[in-house]
Image: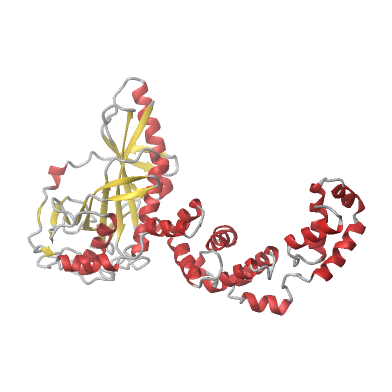
Amino acid sequence: MYEAVIGLEVHLHLKTRTKAFCGCLADYFGAEPNTHTCPVCLGLPGALPVPNRKAVEFGLRLALALGSQVPDRLLFHRKNYFYPDLPKNYQISQYDLPLGQGGTLPLGERSVRIRRLHLEEDAGKSLHLEDRTLLDLNRAGSPLIELVTEPDLRSPEEARLFLQRIQALVQTLGISEASPEEGKMRADVNVSVRRAGEPLGTKVEIKNLNSFKGVQRALEYEIRRQTEILRRGERVKPATMGFEEGSGKTYPLRTKEEEADYRYFPEPDLPPVPISREWLETIRQDLPELPWEKERRYLALGIKAQDAEVLAYTPALARFLDRALALGQASPQALANWLLADVAGLLNERGVALEATRLTPEALARLVTLFERGEITSRVAKGLLPELLEGADPEALVRERGLGAVADETALRAVVAEVIQAMPEAARSVRQGKLKALDALLGQVMRKTQGQARPDLVRRLLLEALGVG
Ligand SMILES: [Zn+2]
């Protein structure tokens, strides 16, 4: 039996206003090429970098959330390599004293160990045309966090889940949009295959994966490839690979630089940045509730485990739910059901995000409360939801359209009698104990009352009228 051993290296763009070491605006997404540059990020001679305090703080937020060890000062190193989109011919990064060491991220029953996380700057972008290559240096000098895990992951699905968890965490911390589609979250993976219980096999690195699905597919392919090599009794060669989305296959890239090739040395232009314990304590106190803490709180409120997990790790839904819960009206599980089933279904159908609608937590909570109190039926509530997405007020709609649940027993008894008379076959079956036939009668009463009768009440009245139960 073969098993995969997977480690991840995740790059996250930090949501700072300016770049890591200069005053250029970091939000260059969609901007004209080379409009967010200055002598510092262009690497012009004599220009001096200045560390962005916010970028350091964002990195510290993540380190503290993961429980990593933070040093008392931040040291920057130069990582030297030559590439057209790296104007300085080195990247300011960190080496032997990273921003964070150790720590864990909970993943279901177990946790994934974090090896390190450090702060660095991004390179620019090369755009390869048929006959030439163009450079866009807007991205050069953008602040990045590189987070490296221990090889604790065992399957492509787990790797994907880990990335989703990190994404939810940094979005909750407010430090990164972590949107792979905008290049704001990228991953490299290391994967080797071994017989369970044996020492680690030879690892292969797959670089620059820019979607969670891509990570999963690249790993699936690579694990199959390595397993076949081992089955044939051959050896896997160490390699750096790329992944082609179209074919779903990995392919060898240039041979990887060895660590010595980078000739790391301390950045002479940047003195160490002291990290006082007071500063760290302030950041720790300001940390928001973390997704796994949210999950525990939702569980304690009685929300089902599966729902609690999805909600806690989907920041937009969690924010919405928390505001709805704060009103203290609707029950937590009912809100969870509505959010995850009905609201999510409608959003999916329309291809819009929750934030893009005019649905407010207050309106949803009031709708759910009307339903829970039996003032409207589930069918009416569901019918109103599309209008709530447009900003409608649930009580106003119910009042204006007379949609309140028909709870008037005398009126309902008349409808029940009418239906029993109109459907003698079904009525006889129920009297004979075939309770399945009750559904047909119930459905007919619901139709006659436009779905506004409370099903539990109709059921009771039907059984009473038929002398059953
Ligand atoms: Zn700049």
Is residue 157 something that shows in the picture? yes
Across and down, in percent, residue 441 comes to 83, 56
Q: Which residue lies at the image location 35% right of the left edge and 25% below the top edge?
A: 229
> Closest to the observer: 466 or 383?
466
Q: Is 127 positioned to the left or the right of 465 in the image?
A: left
Across and down, in percent, residue 254 comes to 25, 40
Across and down, in percent, residue 392 comes to 61, 76
Q: Which residue lies at the image location 75% right of the left edge and 70% below the top edge?
A: 407
Q: Which residue lies at the image location 23% right of the left edge and 66% below the top edge?
A: 57
Q: Residue furthest top?
A: 233
On the rendered image, what quadrant is the N terminus found in?
top left
> Closest to the observer: 327 or 43?
327
Is residue 21 something that shows in the picture? no
> Closest to the observer: 254 or 172?
172
Q: Is 403 positioned to the left or the right of 413 in the image?
A: left
> Closest to the observer: 192 or 367?
367
Q: Which residue lies at the image location 17% right of the left edge and 41% below the top edge?
A: 258
